[in-house]
Image (tube, grey):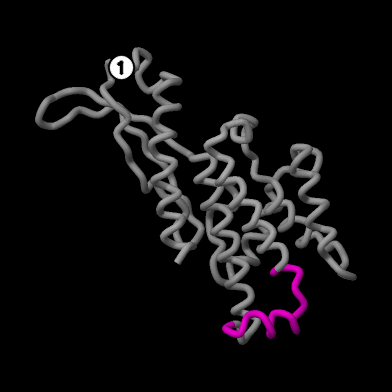
């Protein structure tokens, strides 16, 4: 997701499409991503498959998640949310102007449509960070007790589509994790703790 994490909001949707040139080619997409890509492209009606359109739909279809994301039952509700956001994003992108005028009364000019596309992209990026958090584990020392503990820090996308480190959660005493920040259990425990916190922020924005 790195190439798309610079600027997407507002007229940046044009810039984001150019940045998507840095994304992997169709051959590097997972089988599920390819299937989703083709299904989304079928939503077009009489529109040529321009390069920009292909790049945007590829961005929507390809989450670049690891296989463990889909087998973890704790992610299933998040994945259902993701599916809905993707479908809404693509449906809006392929909407006819007359339908946008009918269904989106607050969109008056082309710049408003561009802004909406950018906001869809940011929402998608944020939800991906809920499902597969980008995290770092650190060792800290409690200032009063001098007890070492591990903490997990996770990233978020700001309103400009830039990734920022936003969330921190204590995992537990360092002596519970013999391998320190490299301990797999520390990572598993940390993600379980931080994921609901990230999703809560997501809901505060999109479930008003």
Magenta span has 58? no
Which residue matches tag 1?
176
Residue at 42 percent of width and 47 percent of height: 198
Name which quarter of the figure residue 27 lies in: top right
Q: Position of residue 45 (x, y in %)?
A: 86, 69
Residue at 68 percent of width and 48 percent of height: 22
In the rendered image of this protein, does residue 130 appear above or below residue 46? above
Closer-to-camera residue (122/105): 105
Q: Position of residue 59 (x, y in %)?
A: 68, 52
Name which quarter of the figure residue 192 lies in: top left
Magenta span has 103? yes
Q: Residues within 10 Å of mark 1 (few under 14, many from 20)?
A: some
Q: In terms of secondary structure, where does tag 1 sit?
A: helix
Residue at 20 percent of width and 28 percent of height: 141
Tell me if 175 is positioned left or right of 190 in this view: left
Tell me if 184 is positioned left or right of 24 in this view: left
* Farthest-out residue, left: 144
- Span colored in magenta: 92-106
- Numbered circles on residues, count: 1
Q: Which part of the image, by quadrant, shows the C terminus?
A: bottom left
In the rendered image of this protein, does residue 201 appear above or below residue 28? below
In the rendered image of this protein, does residue 191 appear above or below residue 90? above
* Farthest-out residue, top: 178
Tell me if 122 is positioned left or right of 95 in this view: left
Q: Position of residue 153 (x, y in %)?
A: 37, 38
Residue at 50 percent of width and 45 percent of height: 130
Q: Position of residue 152 (x, y in %)?
A: 36, 34
Magenta portion: prevailing SS class:
helix
Tell me if 166 is positioned left or right of 49 in this view: left
């Amino acid at each position: 997701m790195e190439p798309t994490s610079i600027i997407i909001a507002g007229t940046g949707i044009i810039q984001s499409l150019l940045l998507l040139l840095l994304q992997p080619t169709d051959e590097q997409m997972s089988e599920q991503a390819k299937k989703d890509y083709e299904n989304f492209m079928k939503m077009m009606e009489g529109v040529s498959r321009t390069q920009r359109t292909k790049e945007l739909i590829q961005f929507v279809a390809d989450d670049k998640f690891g296989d463990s994301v889909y087998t973890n039952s704790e992610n299933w509700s998040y994945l259902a949310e993701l599916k809905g956001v993707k479908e809404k994003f693509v449906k809006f992108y392929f909407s006819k102007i007359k339908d946008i005028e009918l269904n989106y009364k607050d969109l008056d000019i082309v710049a408003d449509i561009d802004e909406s596309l950018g906001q869809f992209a940011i929402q998608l990026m944020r939800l991906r960070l809920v499902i597969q958090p980008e995290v770092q584990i650190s060792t800290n020392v409690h200032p009063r007790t001098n007890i070492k503990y591990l903490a997990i820090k996770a990233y978020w996308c700001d309103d400009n589509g830039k990734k920022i480190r936003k969330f921190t959660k204590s995992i537990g005493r360092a002596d519970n994790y013999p391998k320190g920040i490299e301990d797999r259990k520390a990572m598993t425990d940390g993600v379980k703790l931080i994921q609901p916190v990230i999703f809560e922020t997501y809901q505060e924005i999109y479930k008003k």
